[in-house]
Image (tube, rainbow, N blue to C red):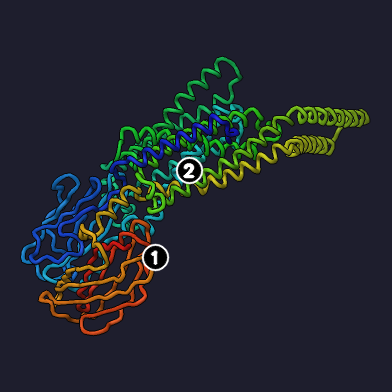
Amino acid sequence: MTRTITPRLRNLLLLLLAVTGTLLAGAGPASAHAALTGSDPAQGVVVAQPPARVSLTFSEKVAMNRDSLRVLDPQGRPVQTGTPANVRGTTYAVDLRSGLGRGTYTVTYQVVSADSHPVAGAYTFSVGAPSKTVVPDAATAVGGGVVGGLYAFGRYVSYAGFIVLAGGTAFVLVCWRRGAGVRALQRLVVGGWLALTAATLWLLLLRGSYTTTGTLADVFDLGLLGQVLQTKPGAALVSRLLLLAAAALFIAVLFGSYQRREEGAEKRDLTFGLGIGGAVVAAGLATSWAASEHASVGLQPGIAMPVDVVHLLAVAAWLGGLTALLVALYRAPAAAPVEAAAVRRFSRLAFGSVLVLVVTGVYQSWRQLGSWSAFTGTRYGQLLLAKIALVALMVGIASASRRWTGRLTDRAAGSAEAEEAEAEKESVTASTAAGQDANAGDEGPADAGDARRAAQLARQRAAMDTARRKRLRDGDTGRYGLRRSVLAEAAVAVVLLAVTTALTQTESGRTEQEAARAATPARSATTAPNGSLTLPFDTGGADGKGVVSLDLDPARAGTNQLHLFVRKPDGRPFDVPEVKVALTLEAKKVGPLTVAAEHITTGHWSADSVQIPMAGDWKVAVTVRTSDIDEVTVSKNAQIG
C-alpha cells in the first residue's frame, strides 16, 4: 500500500526517469545469458579447403564438457577429435579430422553460461559446395522439454517460498508482533520454509539433466549430481539448504518462546535479536540467487549483486508481507483481529519497499537492456514491460487499500463500543441462565443428563460468543473493503511472480541484440547513391557464380519500376531457377517488402508498380537459387529519395 503522491515524490520520480534515460543512452556492452557472437568458419560460408578446426566465440565465458561442441558431416557422423578447449578469452575450439570431403557440415553446441543457464544451437558451413545433410538431432533441446518445465516450476516455487518466508516473518516482527501467536500465520511461514526447502532439493536433482541431456531418467544420476555440486549454481543451492537450517531455528524461536513472552524489556531485546538474525539469514538466501545468476556476470557485478540482494529483499517485504496481511485479515481469530495500527505499519513498510524496487529496478533495467529499443525489440524487454505494468497495477490497487485502512482506523472506536455493549448483553444473559440452573439444582440432585445439558449450554455460549465477535469484525465496512483490495493485490502478485521467474530465465536484451548483430551477414559498406545496384553472387554449385544488376526507377518514394538482370562473370545473360527480391528500411523497422518479379527474357526479370512507402536508406536483398540446393542471398543499400 502506498501514500498519495506528493510534489516531492513526483519530483523524485521524474529525477529517476531522467537518470534512467541518461544510463540507457550511454550504456556500454555487457552480457547475461551467453550468446554466440562469432564463428570460424562463419555461418553459411563455402570454403575451398576443409578447416583444421572449428572455433566459436560467445558473449561471455561458458562451461563445456567433452560433448559440448560437435561437428557432423553430411551423413550426421561426428568428425571432431579431442575435447573442446578455451583458446582465448571467450573463444572455444575443437580440432577436426583430416581429409574431410565436400558437402555441408553441421556445428552443434551445448554449453552452460556463467549465469547458470544452458545455451544450445547449431549452424552449417560447406566445404567445396553445399549439399544435403542428415542430422536427426543437431542440437539437444537443452533447457526445454519436460525437464525444462519442471525446472521452471521449481524456480517459481522457490521464489514464492522465499517471499512468503522472509516477508511473513518481517510482517510479524515489524508490523504485528501479536501475530506470532496466530496459528494461520504460523502455518503460512512454515509453509514458505517447506516450499523453499523442497524446491531447492528439487532443483538440485534436476540441475544435471537440465543442463546436459534433458532426459527425465537422468534426474537421479548420481554422477550428474556430483558434477552439479562442483559448479557455481550447485554450490549456491547447497548454501541455500544450509541457510534454511538456520531459518528453521529462527522460526522455532519466533513461534515458540518469543510469542509466549509477555511484553517488556526482555521481549524487546529478543525482538531486536530476531530482527538482526532474520535479516542476516534472509540476505544470505537472497545472495544464493544473486551470486549464481544474472547479477554475477556482465557489467559491474560488484555493484549488481548487492543491488540484486536488496531488490529481492524489497520484493519479499512487499509481496510476502501482503500475503501475511491477507491471511491475518481472513484467518485471524475473531477475538483478536489484526489491528488498524498493524495495517498502517505495513502500509509504511510497503511504501518503502516500492521506493527501493523503483531505484534498484532502474539500475537492473539499464544493465540488462542497455537501449530503449531493447524494451520492444527483445523478449526480455517485453517481459520487463509486462512486469512494470503489473507493478503499476498493484500500486494502483494499493492506493485503494490505503483508503480502506483510513476508514478502518476511523471505525475502530465505534466497533469497540459496540463490542462492549454486546459483551455486556451476553453477560447478563449468561448470568440469568446460570441462576436458573442453580435454582434447578436446589430442587434435587443433578444427574448425568443435567451435566450433559450444562456442557452443551457452555458450547453454545462459546459458539455464540465467537459468532458475535466475527459478526462485529465482518460488519466493519472498512475491514471488508480492505480484505477485498488486499486479495486483489495478492492475485496480481501471483502473476507478477510468474513474469519475474520468466525474466530470470530469459536472455538479456543486451545479449540478444549483440547476438543479432553478430549473426547479421556482412554487406557492402557503401550505399548506392540511387536505385542502380550491382551485386556479385556465388551459390557454390555448378554455374553458381554471377552478377545481379538491379535498377529501381525513379528511385523515389511511391511507385517505382524494377528491372533485374542476371549475368555470368563474362557478362553473358543466363537464367536461374528462382530470383527473389525484398526491401527493408531498417531505421524505421519497415519491411521486408517482397517484390514479385516476372521473367521477361533470358536473364531478365521485371516488376511494375513497386511501392516504396517512404524515403530512406533501403536494404535491397536479392536471393538467387541456381539449383535445388544451391542458394545465396546478397544485399546492398540503396538511397531512395
Relative to residue 195, is residue 215 depicted above or below?
below
Q: Is residue 52 left or right of residue 67?
A: left
Looking at the image, which residue is at 58% across and 21% down? 261
How many marks the image carries: the answer is: 2
Front residue of this view, candidates 578 and 401: 578
Instruction: Kindly give the residue lying farthest to the bottom in the view shown.
Output: 601
In this rendering, the answer to whether 521 lies above or below 459 is below
In this image, 243 relative to 209: left or right? right
Residue type indicated by callout 1: Pro
The structure residue drawn at horizontal position 60% and vertical position 42%, both measured from the top left corner, is 397
| Residue lying furthest left | 99
Image quarter in which the C terminus is found? bottom left
Q: Secondary structure at mark 2?
A: helix
Above or below for 479 versus 207? above
Image spot of residue 278 (x, y percent):
46, 28
Looking at the image, which is closer to me, 397 or 578? 578
Residue, disc 2: 160
Q: Residues within 10 Å of mark 1 (few under 14, many from 20)?
A: few
Identify which amino acid the numbered label 2 is placed on: Ala
Give the numbered dot on residue 613.
1
